[in-house]
């Protein structure tokens, strides 16, 4: 079976999601990796399981990318992308062009045409049997293990003539040395009870000591305490860390929808009846403004710091 994966980019570099999507796609067959920025081709060619890197320069907008994928589609049984904002934009367009029903948000691959995906905001999992001759898939990168970067696949450069439907005028990027929320191994999340953007420094400090990414509830984001791209949940990011530390978070269904993949949940909450406490592996019941600084200081004393 032949598989084409659209590489997920973080500016001009491969995002950490790409190695995970390749890990997922390699279960289906030999993977060709389409990379839309020449700066990312050498990292792409190092990914294990990649048979060939296809480097193409097209305008980075969904219509042009979908047109390029459509032109490559006849050579492949599967066309796969991360369920990132780009994947969610591009793949339904491609599926419509190919007259295929896409299978989205895959969290497990059970066979050549059997895929598991969450439904009802993550409250149930459905197993889908996709009997189509060609498959258009998006995968939740955090659900799959990344492949190693020890390969050396050949690079084929494609001269694409896909015209731009839109012109990119400017790109604004948030610079941060904090791990990517979607693929971080540890995430510390803060709720609205943190009380202010200043108060969120408590969450960030704990995150920094652990080398963790920082997340937030929608209530905290709506209150202006945390930036929008930190939101975790049904309408935010889906995370699957090894450890999720939920600080002052009640555990509303819409938030839980984003943390279903977390392997261990630690709740810090003053309410022992809070829903997050009920599902946590470990709960610290008390005032976050006492517990979090103490925990951060203890971890610092133990020399736990993983960042710098
Ligand atoms: C369509 C829709 C989509 C949504 N999407 C999302 C989403 O993607 N992500 C999301 O997070 N939410 C989402 N929501 C909102 C969601 O329903 C909740 O309102 C939100 O998650 C609650 O955030 P919270 O836990 O910060 O606040 P609250 O529910 O108010 O909980 C605060 C918690 O802090 C605890 N607490 C208070 N003070 C302290 C203290 N000093 N120390 C320790 N603990 C303390 C309380 O006991 C409580 O458990 C969505 C809602 C809708 C309707």
Image (cartoon, rainbow, N blue to C red):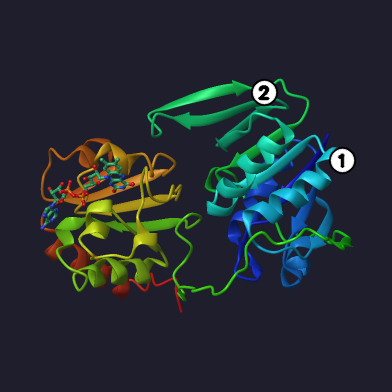
- Which corner quadrant holds the N terminus? top right
Of the two numbered discs 2 and 1 on the same chain, state the one appearing first in sequence: 1
Indicate the quadrant where residue 99 lies: top right
- Coordinates of residue 34 in the picture (x, y in percent): 76, 55
- Coordinates of residue 167 in the picture (x, y in percent): 62, 68
Viewer-side residue, 191 vs 89: 89
State the SS at label 2. Answer: loop
Q: Residues within 10 Å of mark 1 (few under 14, many from 20)?
A: few
Q: Work out which residue is located at the far bottom of the displayed protein and give it.
A: 308
* Residue, disc 2: 130
Cα distance, mark 2 to mark 1? Answer: 19 Å
Viewer-side residue, 22 vs 218: 218
Viewer-side residue, 290 vs 239: 239
Q: Residue at x 57, y 73 (%)?
A: 169
Residue 297 placement, left or right of 29: left
Q: Residue at x 68, y 46 (%)?
A: 23
Q: Is residue 27 above or below residue 293?
A: above
Residue 296 placement, left or right of 132: left
Indicate the quadrant where residue 54 lies: bottom right
Q: Which mark is residue 75?
A: 1
- Coordinates of residue 188 in the picture (x, y in percent): 33, 59
Q: Residue at x 37, y 42 (%)?
A: 234
Callout 2 touching callout 1 (CB < 8 Å): no
State the SS at label 1. Answer: helix
């Amino acid at each position: 079976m032949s598989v084409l994966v659209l590489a997920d980019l973080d500016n001009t570099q491969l995002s950490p999601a790409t190695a995970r999507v390749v890990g997922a796609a390699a279960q289906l067959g030999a993977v060709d990796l389409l990379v839309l920025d020449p700066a990312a081709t050498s990292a792409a060619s190092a990914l294990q399981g990649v048979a060939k890197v296809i480097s193409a320069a097209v305008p980075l907008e969904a219509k042009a990318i979908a047109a390029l994928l459509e032109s490559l589609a006849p050579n492949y049984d599967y066309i796969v992308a991360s369920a990132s904002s780009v994947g969610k934009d591009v793949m339904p367009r491609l599926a419509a062009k190919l007259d295929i029903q896409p299978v989205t948000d895959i969290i497990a691959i059970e066979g050549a045409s059997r895929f598991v995906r969450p439904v009802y905001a993550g409250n149930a999992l459905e197993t889908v049997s996709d009997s189509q001759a060609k498959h258009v898939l998006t995968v939740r990168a955090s659900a799959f293990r990344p492949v190693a970067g020890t390969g050396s696949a050949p690079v084929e450069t494609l001269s694409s003539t896909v015209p731009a439907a839109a012109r990119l005028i400017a790109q604004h990027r948030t610079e941060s040395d904090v791990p990517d929320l979607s693929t971080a191994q540890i995430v510390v999340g803060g709720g609205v009870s943190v009380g202010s953007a200043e108060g969120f420094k408590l969450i960030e400090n704990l995150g920094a000591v652990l080398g963790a990414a920082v997340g937030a509830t929608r209530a905290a984001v709506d209150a202006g305490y945390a930036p929008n791209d930190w939101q975790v949940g049904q309408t935010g990011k889906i995370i699957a860390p090894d450890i999720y530390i939920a600080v002052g978070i009640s555990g509303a269904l819409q938030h839980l929808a984003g943390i279903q993949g977390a392997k261990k949940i630690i709740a810090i909450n003053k309410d022992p009846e809070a829903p997050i406490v009920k599902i946590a592996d470990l709960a610290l019941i008390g005032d976050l403004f006492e517990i979090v600084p103490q925990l951060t200081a203890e971890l610092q004393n133990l020399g736990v710091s993983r960042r710098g």
